[in-house]
């Protein structure tokens, strides 16, 4: 029975079903994207409003009011000139990123809101399309490369980034570049590329902790140098005072994720935590957002358990590229950061694309990528019925890798025994 099931999974029928399903989902996402982005109702065209935060911050910065980008009243007043009704749980779309991001986005405010959205869309489409083709270049068949690249562009996380005008594709680009540079021993430059993690500072903190633990000092100095340079270059516009405002603001936002995000008491940031893809989002969906204590306790215990396993695992195997076990530990490290992040939403799931350059050279098969893409598209189910299938899959993947590492990958029960265990000579 097991052998028949394995033959069917390796057969053409299953492959055809995978391709047809993913193509169908991709076409659907493209159609609904075009309908909303170019033909939606109102001057803003549609119901995804995240871009209002970025455009509002860019506008205020361009007009010498960067000190007001974290002011709810000022941001609300500006956004009402574009969308004449309340949006989001806060009634407006808050800007949650560091001040220098507002400076970098300020050229968009030279355009009208809809022109700026189109320009931002084009830039992100070019970026994700180039990354998608690069990620699958190790596939031998040209048709397979084109198919997989197109499917990578047409996943729900990419759709969510493009329709919302989010910044996660930029984070992914810098992270992929950093992996490539570090893999080719350009350590300082790899650190420089990690500067995109500052878009969401919690990701930069996770990376910094990892670099310190594994004593990757050259990468760390590159990252710190890039961060200092970015702050210094934009300082004439931002001024130091706004960083104090931002620190106070972001601490309030962080606290919101652990006090019910407005469901129990008033919070700086309010929103639906069950939509997040991390561990806190999973337990919020299970227990409800008003059960603050229960969610926090279970989240804390789960994270503690994963961290204990991680510490035990890295005593045996450290993340790297020279062997399968090291590559798997690198995947586990990325997955663990995503699970811990309390503010990771569906658009941030594009960061699992970081798994591809780590594992794909080991097993460059079309079927492997298609199964991987099905895992990503499970986020659509999660967004509808909040089962958190993606979160559970990431937890299982992480635990499996960590247990394999603790057991030196010799256990017969290893869920990765189907992968080759020899050292990988990666020349891509």
Image: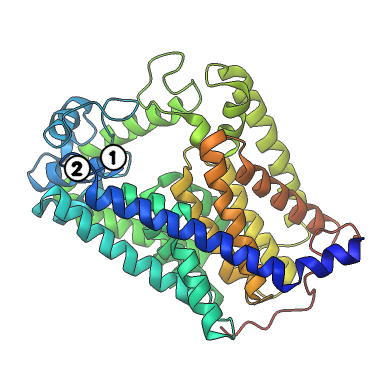
Q: 49 and 40: which one is in front?
A: 40
Look at the picture and state if 268 lies above or below 149. above
Q: Is residue 186 visible?
A: no
Which residue in the protein does label 2 denote? 44
Spot occupied by residue 132 in the image (x, y as percentages of width and height): 46, 70
Spot occupied by residue 269 in the image (x, y as percentages of width and height): 37, 27
Look at the picture and state if 287 lies above or below 18. above
Q: 331 and 317: which one is in front?
A: 331
Q: 284 and 401: which one is in front?
A: 284
Q: Which mark is first along the chain, 1 or 2?
A: 2
Q: Residue at x 15, y 55 (%)?
A: 115
Q: To which quarter of the image does residue 95 belong?
A: top left
Using a 10 Å C-alpha cutoff, classify the residue at mark 2 as few (fewer than 14 neighbours), some (14 to 19) or many (20 or more): many
Q: Secondary structure at mark 2?
A: loop
Using a 10 Å C-alpha cutoff, classify the residue at mark 1 as few (fewer than 14 neighbours), some (14 to 19) or many (20 or more): many
Which residue in the protein does label 1 denote? 49
Q: Residue at x 79, y 78 (%)?
A: 422
Farthest residue, direction top: 265
């Amino acid at each position: 029975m097991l052998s028949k099931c394995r033959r069917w999974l390796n057969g053409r029928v299953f492959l055809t079903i995978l391709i047809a399903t993913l193509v169908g989902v991709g076409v659907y996402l493209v159609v609904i994207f075009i309908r909303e982005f170019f033909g939606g109702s109102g001057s803003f065209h549609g119901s995804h409003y995240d871009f209002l935060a970025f455009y509002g911050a860019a506008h205020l910065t361009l007009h010498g009011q960067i000190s007001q980008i974290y002011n709810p009243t000022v941001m609300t007043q500006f956004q009402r000139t574009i969308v004449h009704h309340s949006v989001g749980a806060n009634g407006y779309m808050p800007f949650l990123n560091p001040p220098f991001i507002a400076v970098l986005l300020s050229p968009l405010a030279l355009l009208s809101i809809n022109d700026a959205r189109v320009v931002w869309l084009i830039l992100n489409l070019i970026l994700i399309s180039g990354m998608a083709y690069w990620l699958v270049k190790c596939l031998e068949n040209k048709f397979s490369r084109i198919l997989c690249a197109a499917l990578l562009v047409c996943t729900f996380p990419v759709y969510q980034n493009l329709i919302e005008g989010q910044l996660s594709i930029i984070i992914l680009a810098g992270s992929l570049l950093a992996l490539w540079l570090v893999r080719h021993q350009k350590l300082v430059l790899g650190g420089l590329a990690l500067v995109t993690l500052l878009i969401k500072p919690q990701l930069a903190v996770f990376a910094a902790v990892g670099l310190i633990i594994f004593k990757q000092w050259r990468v760390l100095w590159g990252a710190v140098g890039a961060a200092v340079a970015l702050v210094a270059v934009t300082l004439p516009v931002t001024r130091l005072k706004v960083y104090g405002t931002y620190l106070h603001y972001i601490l309030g936002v962080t606290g919101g994720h652990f006090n019910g995000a407005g469901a129990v008491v008033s919070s700086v940031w309010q929103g639906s935590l069950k939509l997040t893809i991390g561990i806190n989002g999973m337990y919020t969906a299970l227990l409800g957002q008003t059960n603050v204590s229960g969610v926090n306790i279970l989240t804390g215990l789960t994270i503690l358990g994963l961290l204990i396993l991680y510490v035990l695992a890295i005593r045996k195997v450290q993340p790297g590229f020279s062997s399968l076990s090291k590559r798997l530990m690198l995947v586990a490290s990325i997955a663990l950061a995503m699970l811990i992040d309390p503010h990771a939403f569906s658009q941030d799931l594009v960061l699992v694309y970081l798994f591809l350059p780590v594992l794909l050279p080991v097993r460059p098969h079309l079927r492997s990528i298609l199964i991987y893409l099905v895992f990503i598209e499970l986020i659509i189910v999660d967004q509808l019925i909040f089962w958190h299938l993606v979160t559970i899959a990431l937890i299982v993947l992480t635990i499996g890798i960590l247990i394999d590492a603790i057991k030196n990958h010799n256990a017969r029960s290893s869920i990765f025994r189907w992968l080759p265990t020899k050292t990988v000579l990666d020349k891509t």
